[in-house]
Amino acid sequence: MDTKSHKIAGVGVLVALAMVLSYLESLIPISLGIPGIKLGLSNVVTLFALYQFGGGIAFGVAVCRIVLCGVTFGSLSTMLYSFAGGLLSFAVMFVLKKTEKFSIYGISIAGGVMHNVGQLLVAAYVMQTAKIIYYMPVLLIAGTLAGAAIGILGAMIYRRIDT
């Protein structure tokens, strides 16, 4: 098998893994009493792909996961929120990684925070109110904690698999 075939197979495995993690997380009945807050376990795959394969493949994995999970497990509405959060998160993580001034942990935290910011901006637009922005401090804390957890997990995986 040539290198291109290996890369395509690897991307397929990453997309499938992200979908499985997303689905498994949806089955976990954790309710913190705050709507919309979750760990975002599938984001560890995007973070890993960004470090292992670069921005293009990581972007493709993120978009494929959002579309496939939205079509399979969600709705057009959930896909809209996922795209807003996922694409803003990815863009910030990509730019921060390019600067080479941030660790994988800092990049993941920024991604977690920006994911929530993107979703909150869409919610403000959909609901036609800026009052939802009052929810921002809670989401910033949640994004920071989730991003830190994903960063720790992503760093552990990357160190063990990096070739």
Image (cartoon, helix red, strand yellow):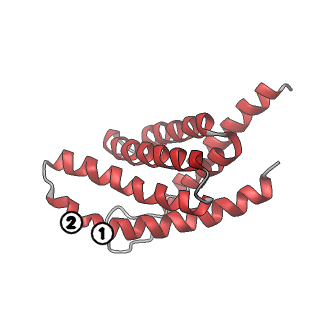
Instruction: Answer left or right for 149 relative to 116.
Output: right
What residue sits 35% from the left and 42% below the top? Answer: 75
Instruction: Answer left or right for 117 relative to 129.
Output: right
**Is any atom of residue 143 visible in this view?**
yes
Q: Is residue 81 above or below residue 107?
A: above
Which residue of the protein is positioned furthest toward the right in this rendering? 1
Q: Position of residue 15 (x, y in %)?
A: 61, 41
Q: Are marks 2 and 1 in contact (CB under 8 Å)?
A: yes
The front one of 82 and 136 is 136
**Which corner quadrant of the image does residue 126 belong to?**
top left
- Tell me the CA gap for discs 2 and 1: 7 Å
Counting every numbered tag in the picture gives 2
What residue sits 79% from the left and 59% below the top? Answer: 160
* Label 2: which secondary element: helix
What residue sits 45% from the left and 67% below the top? Answer: 144
The front one of 9 and 59 is 59
**Which corner quadrant of the image does residue 71 belong to?**
top left
Q: Position of residue 110 (x, y in %)?
A: 47, 58
The front one of 147 and 13 is 147
What residue sits 41% from the left and 53% below the top? Answer: 115
The front one of 101 and 117 is 101
Q: Amino acid at mark 2?
A: Tyr
* Label 1: which secondary element: helix
Q: Is residue 64 above or below residue 159?
A: above
**Is any atom of residue 28 visible in this view?**
no
Residue 137 numbered tag = 1
Q: Which quarter of the rendering shows the N terminus?
A: top right
Residue 134 numbered tag = 2
Q: Position of residue 7 (x, y in %)?
A: 74, 32
